[in-house]
Image: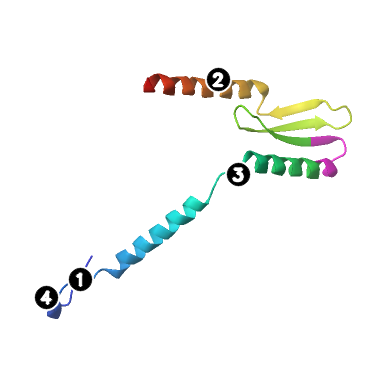
Amino acid sequence: MNIHNISSLGQTPQPDLRMADATRKSASHSAETQQKREPSRQEVQKAVESINLALQRASKSTALQFTVDPNTRTTVVKVMDTESGELIRQFPSEAALAIAESIGDLQKGLLLGQEA
């Protein structure tokens, strides 16, 4: 809201400084947002290897293993028996990963079908 002094009726109204401040803050926020980026596959892989190494040192009988599924780009957590190397449990399961991959393939097909 712009309120002017009665004595300034014949003069050019001054710009609302609050609006200029809001515009400046908005531009600053969008510049910060543009600087944020997704990590590369190499950065994710390095982080996963670091987590796995730290977790191997923490437990003797079981270990958590983190991987990234290449097809769905989903983080997979596996609980492994360190003595036998046997997989105890996996989150998400192989079936869930297969479903996610199928859904992704279906969406790609729908997108291509709509563009044609």
Disc sitting over residue 102 in the figure:
2
- Furthest residue to the bottom? 7
Q: Is residue 23 above or below residue 115?
A: below
Binning the other alpha carbons within 10 Å of mark 3 as few (below 14), some (14 to 19) or many (20 upward) gives: few
Foreground: disc 2 or disc 3: 3
Binning the other alpha carbons within 10 Å of mark 1 as few (below 14), some (14 to 19) or many (20 upward) gives: few
Residue 56, given in percent of the width and then of the height, sits at 82, 40
Residue type at numbered disc 2: Ser
Query: Would you identify the image quadrant in which residue 1 lies?
Result: bottom left
- For the point 56% across and 44% down, which residue is it? 38
Foreground: disc 1 or disc 2: 2
Q: Quadrant of the C terminus?
A: top left
Q: CA distance from mark 4 to mark 1?
A: 11 Å
Magenta residues span 56-63
Please say if the residues under marks 2 and 3 sit with CB atoms less than 8 Å apart.
no
Q: For the image shown, how many numbered marks are present on the structure?
A: 4
- For the point 43% across and 54% down, which residue is it? 30
Disc sitting over residue 39 in the figure:
3
Q: Answer left or right for 84 relative to 5.
A: right
